[in-house]
Image: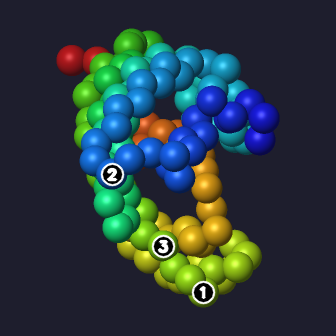
Amino acid sequence: MKAFSKYEIPFVGLKSGEHFFNYSVDNDFFAEFEESPISDGKFEIELIFEKGNFFTLTFNIIGSVAAECDRCAEKFELNFEESHPLMVKFDDNIAIEEDVPETDEDLIYISRNETHLNVARFIYEFIILSIPIKKSSS
């Protein structure tokens, strides 16, 4: 998606070691995802991208989302700070998306033919996962 081109990391040109990327996401970002439960949110993401034989990504997320208290139905700003790891490994057998092996949520596989990694979907999913099931304004 063209809207997410700024979330592309051209890892082929990166040297081994740690690299830092910073992203700001807001309502426009969440509007790009169909049926997003977030319509009013603002977040800063620091991504630590460690390149070696595989990639280790750490998404440090700080921000807030408009929420409704589950006890009193009052609107409030839910602030949180979360960190989510993700490991990216290469698999020579991946030619198309259907070939991707089953993994756990902290590990993904990509083809050795890939040259870029788009992190927009991961940012979105980690923010959604950070919102507590029960929300309380107190």
Left or right of 120, for residue 65: left
Disc on res. 11: none
According to the picture, the residue beneath numbered tag 2 turns out to be 16
Where disc 1 sits, the SS reads loop
Question: What is the residue that sits farthest to the right in this orientation?
Answer: 2
The earlier-in-sequence mark between 3 and 2 is 2
Residue 37, position as x, y percentages in the image: 58, 35
Which of discs 2 and 1 lies nearer the camera? The answer is 2
Q: Is residue 131 visible?
A: no
The disc placed on residue 90 is: 3
Which amino acid lies under the numbered mark 1 shown in the image of this protein? Asn
Q: Nearer the viewer, mark 3 or mark 2?
A: 2
Q: Are marks 3 and 2 in contact (CB under 8 Å)?
A: no
* Left or right of 116 in this view: 83: left
Whether residue 124 appears in this view of the structure is: yes
Q: What is the distance, in whole Å, between disc 2 and disc 1 at their CAs?
A: 24 Å
Mark 1 — residue? 93
